[in-house]
Amino acid sequence: MRAKRALLWSAAVAIVVGAAVAVTSCGGGGSTGGGAALKIALLLPESKTARYETQDKPLFEAKVKALCPDCQILYSNANQDATQQQSQAEAALANGAKVLVLDPVDFASAGAIVTKANAAKVPVISYDRLITNADLAYYVSFDNEKVGKLQGQALLDKLTADGNAGKTIVMINGAPTDNNAKLFKAGAHSVLDGKVKIGAEYDTPDWSPDKAQTEMDQAITKLGKDGFVGVYCANDGTAGGAIASMTGAGIDPKTRPTTGQDAELAAIQRILVGEQFMTIYKAIKPEAEATAMLAVALAKGESPPASLTLTTVNNGTKDVNSVILDPVPVTKDNVKATVVADGFWTAKDICTGAYAAACKAAGIQ
């Protein structure tokens, strides 16, 4: 998936302590008054979920650049490898990072990274996914159990409207190493349990669309083509895999409402043509920008900006000061009023050839 607008500036790649870490300079000089530039590490977990490279990274970098032209960002993507992410974090610390912004591959094992950073007096911001049992400085994310509840309720309402209340569905959850996936799953079950029959349920390693497709293949084999009426998928990547499986099995995905999350471009297009029922829009721009504001303040030894509304989330070790944002459900009826109105995707992005007529019908032009 291509990013909707280019927000990247010049980058240089440095090899640090045996790990490749991309170093993006936030501005021309890289230092102030002859002193060393402040360095902020951004450590993202994977690239199979399109949002990280197309949204989170450029939005975070742009906000840091605006706030701190002389800061440097040490960027790494772990490609769903927890061991690699630990090496990348160690490299960033060795390279002088003053703050780690860490979106963990494995929420449990990432505590070791936090311990090492704290020993070096480097604060850690847990980004998007909560790191449990660790002494974090901040946490920035969405109400993730609410995400699951919104997905489950949207699916339940659709099934009821279609006359399929109480019938069998398939559940394709996220990666078991992701604490958010656990919360999405809990939220969905809190709505769906007792209201539908769950004929097959899977936790999807690495959030992989290919693995989700295999899981859906298995569910169809188990239940039969007519043995389920809808599919709960935890995100848009897994939804894409499930829809591909149904299509390959000769099942029209328009007849089996399927949930998703992240408002990926491909998902929005599928929603407009009726192949996917809904997604969850999480406004990544305020999430990334709030994190950048906290990271710059920490790097400079300042208090968090007064404009940020902080609450607390307990991660098993402490009540972590947190910025928690609200997710928004998106169906065909409100694509225009949400992701298009916010500029998350433009009509030009969405309304390519095969989707032009559906866009016109939805008033998106």
Image (cartoon, rainbow, N blue to C red):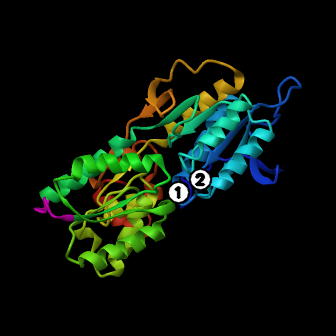
Q: Residue at horizontal 50%, vertical 53%?
A: 177
Residue 183 at what x, y percent from top left? 38, 45
- When the figure is inspected, residue 112 is found, relative to residue 345, above or below; the finding is above
Q: Which residues are magenta?
A: 162-168
Q: Are marks 1 and 2 in contact (CB under 8 Å)?
A: yes
Mark-to-mark CA distance, 1 and 2: 6 Å
User: Residue 354, can we see it?
Assistant: no
Quarter in which the C terminus is drawn: bottom left
Residue type at tag 2: Glu
Residue type at tag 1: Ala
Residue indicated by mark 1: 50
Q: Is residue 237 left or right of residue 221?
A: right
Residue indicated by mark 2: 53
User: Residue 163, can we see it?
Assistant: yes
- Observer-nearest of 323 and 290: 323
- Tell me, yes or no, whether the highlighted magenta stretch contains residue 311: no
Q: Secondary structure at mark 1?
A: loop
